[in-house]
Amino acid sequence: MFVMGCAELLVVGVLDVMAEDLDVSVSSAGALVTTFALGLAFGGPLLTALTMRLDKRTVLAAALIVFILGNVVAVTTTGFGLLLGSRALTGAAAGLHAATAFAVAIASVPPERAGRAIAVVISGVSVSAALGVPLGTVVGNLLGWRGSFVAVIVLACAVLAAAMVLVPSVPAVEGSAADQARHAFAPRVLAVLGLCFLVFASTYAALTYIVPFLAEVTGVDGATAGAFLLAYGAATALGSFGGGRFADRNAAGTLVVGTAGCAVTLLALYVLGANTVAVAVVMLAWGVCVFGMAPSLQYRVVSLAGSGGGLAQSLPASAINTGIAFGSFAGGVAIERSSVPAAILTAVGIALAAVTVAAATRRLTPAPAVEPHGPARRPPAD
C-alpha cells in the first residue's frame, strides 16, 4: 500500500519536469493524478467483482503484476496519451490490491483484531501521503521522472516476491457477484460510504489549498510550510495506527467523535490562522482526527455489508477518491468567488454535514443472517 500510494503521489513532485519532457502544459500533466484516482475509484470495484471467485493470494499477485506492467509502460513510452492510459490501469490495479489486502488482513487475525489489521493496511497509505511527494521529488531530481517510476517498479517487484513468500492462501468469498452487490450496495452501506465521501471532501477542500493559506494568512512559506505539511503527514500516520484499536472497540462511536474533531480543528484553523503556533498544533490534531477515522470507516462499510463484504472492501477507496476530487473542486470555487480562507470555511461546512451523517448512521447494524431452515440469527454487536 505504501508503494502504490507513492506511485500515485510522486507525480506531484515531478509534475513540471514531466510536463516539459512530454511537451504538455502543467495543467494537462495534472491529469496524470486524476486518471490514477479515477482508475482506482471505478476500476478497483469492477476488478474486485470480477475476481471474487479467486484465491486472494492469487489476486494480490495478479494486481501487483498489472501494477508493475503499467509502470513499465509509463517508463518506456514517449506518448502522453499512452502514459495517461497506463496511469488509469495502475490505478485500477491499486484499487484491486487495496480491496484484496483488506480481505487478507482481516482473514489473518481473530475477529476482535480486525480493526487493527485494517489500520496496518491503511497506515501504508498514510505514510505514503507523508513521504510520497518529498521522496518522489528527491528521486525525480536525481534520476529524472522516469527514474522515480523505475524505483517504484523495483519496490513493487520486492513486494510481489514478499507476498508470494509471506501471504497465506485465502479462499474466495462465497456467493455470486450479484449477491455480493445486493448487500454491498444496501442503503445502510451507502450511508457510510456517503460519510467516507464527506470526511475526505472536507479534508481536501482545505488541504489542497493549505500552502497558499499558510503563505497568505499564517505568513509561512517555503521550507517552513513544508515542515508544517510533514508534521501533518506524521499525524496522519499516527492516527491511522491508533485508529485501529478504536475501530475494534466502537467503530460507529469513533466516527462521531472523529468527524466532530475534524469540524472543530478546521474551524480553529480558520479562526486562528494568523497564529503560527496555533496552526501547527491544529494541523497535528487535524491529521490525527482524519486518519484516526479511516480504519473505522473501512470497518463499518465491511461489517454493514455482511455477506457482501468481499465486494464492499473496494468501495471506501472509491468514495474517498470521489470525495477528494469534489473537495478540491469545492475549495477552488470558494477561492475564485472570495479568497483563500473561504476554502477552509467551505471545509468546515462539509465537515459539519459529516458530523450529522456520522450521528445518523451510528445505530445502523448489518442485516440478520438467515439460516436455510430456521429463524434469523441476531448479528454480532458492532
Image (tube, rainbow, N blue to C red):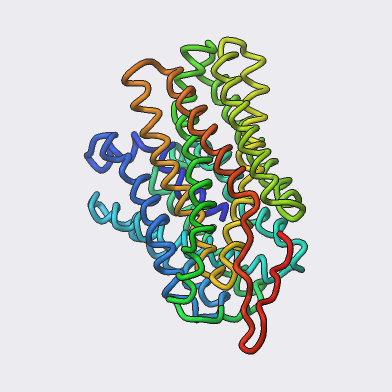
Residue lying farthest to the front in this orientation:
375
Is 202 above or below relative to 117?
above
- Residue 359 visible in rendering: yes
| Location of residue 86 in the rendering, given as x and y in whole percent from the top left corner | 33, 58
| Location of residue 257 in the rendering, given as x and y in whole percent from the top left corner | 68, 38
In the rendered image, which quarter contains the C terminus? bottom right
Instruction: Work out whether residue 49 or residue 87 is closer to the camera in this orientation and state it.
Output: 49
Residue at image position (65%, 32%) is: 261
Is 173 above or below relative to 139?
below
Instruction: Work out whether residue 74 or residue 180 is closer to the camera in this orientation and state it.
Output: 180
Instruction: Work out whether residue 28 or residue 204 is closer to the camera in this orientation and state it.
Output: 204
In the image: residue 20, left or right of residue 210: left
- Residue 123 visible in rendering: no
In the image: residue 261, left or right of residue 185: right
In the rendered image, which quarter contains the N terminus? bottom right
Q: Quadrant of residue 110?
A: bottom right
Residue at image position (25%, 43%) is: 22
Is 45 above or below relative to 215?
below
Is 203 above or below relative to 294?
above
| Location of residue 296 in the rendering, given as x and y in whole percent from the top left corner | 65, 51
Q: Quadrant of residue 21?
A: top left
| Location of residue 266 in the rendering, given as x and y in whole percent from the top left corner | 57, 25
Residue at image position (60%, 51%) is: 297
